[in-house]
Image (cartoon, rainbow, N blue to C red):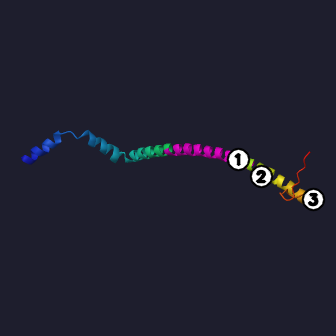
Amino acid sequence: MTSKKKQKKKDNTAPSLLKVLAFDIFVRHWMVSALAVLLVISAMMLAQTSHEARRMTADFQSLRQSYNDEQVVWEALRLEMTTVSEADRISSDAKKKLGMVEVTTKNEKVISL
């Protein structure tokens, strides 16, 4: 008789709602649950990828600006180098073609008026 009472007592209790929902979601509709999880993971990865793309675009623009600044400095240095080498070329041509020499204390002559 005791076993009949226990069995009757078990039949009267309603199943837990949490157990029913878990069984329904994860066992009966496991494909939909898996797709929902994959959808959430995909959305998170999309958000991360978008963030990385924005960060990389900002880095690229910063590097592009640095490149342009360095190009301006490079062109200024090239112009200065051309100017300096032009003066050096004029000095060497004067020494070769006209026989000019640089003034030293030995060959310096002071003229007073």
Q: In the figure, residue 89 lies in which quadrant?
A: bottom right
Q: Helix, strand, or loop for circle 1?
A: helix
Tag 3 or tag 1, which sits nearer the N-term?
1
Tell me how far mark 1 sits from mark 2, CA to CA: 12 Å
Image coordinates for residue 23, horizontal then vertical, percent = 30, 45
Going by the numbered disc 2, the residue's amino acid type is Met
Which portion, as a residue range, is magenta?
48-75
- Residue 81: assigned label: 2
Q: Residue at x 55, y 44 (%)?
A: 55
Q: Which mark is residue 97?
A: 3
Q: Give how far across and how far down residue 75 sits, in percent.
A: 74, 48
Q: Is residue 89 above or below residue 40?
A: below
Q: Decide: few, some or many residues near mark 2? Use Cα within 10 Å; few <14, some 14-19, many ≥20.
A: few
Tags 1 and 3 touching, CB below 8 Å: no
Q: Is residue 81 left or right of residue 9?
A: right
Disc 1 to disc 3, C-alpha distance: 36 Å
Dot 3: within a 10 Å radius of its alpha carbon, few (fewer than 14), some, or many (20 or more) residues?
Answer: few
Residue type of the residue flagged with mark 3: Lys
Q: Are marks 1 and 2 in contact (CB under 8 Å)?
A: no
User: What residue sits right under mark 1 in the picture?
Assistant: 73
> Looking at the image, which residue sits at the far left?
1
Secondary element under disc 2, as helix, strand or loop, is helix
Query: Dot 3 lies on which element?
Result: helix
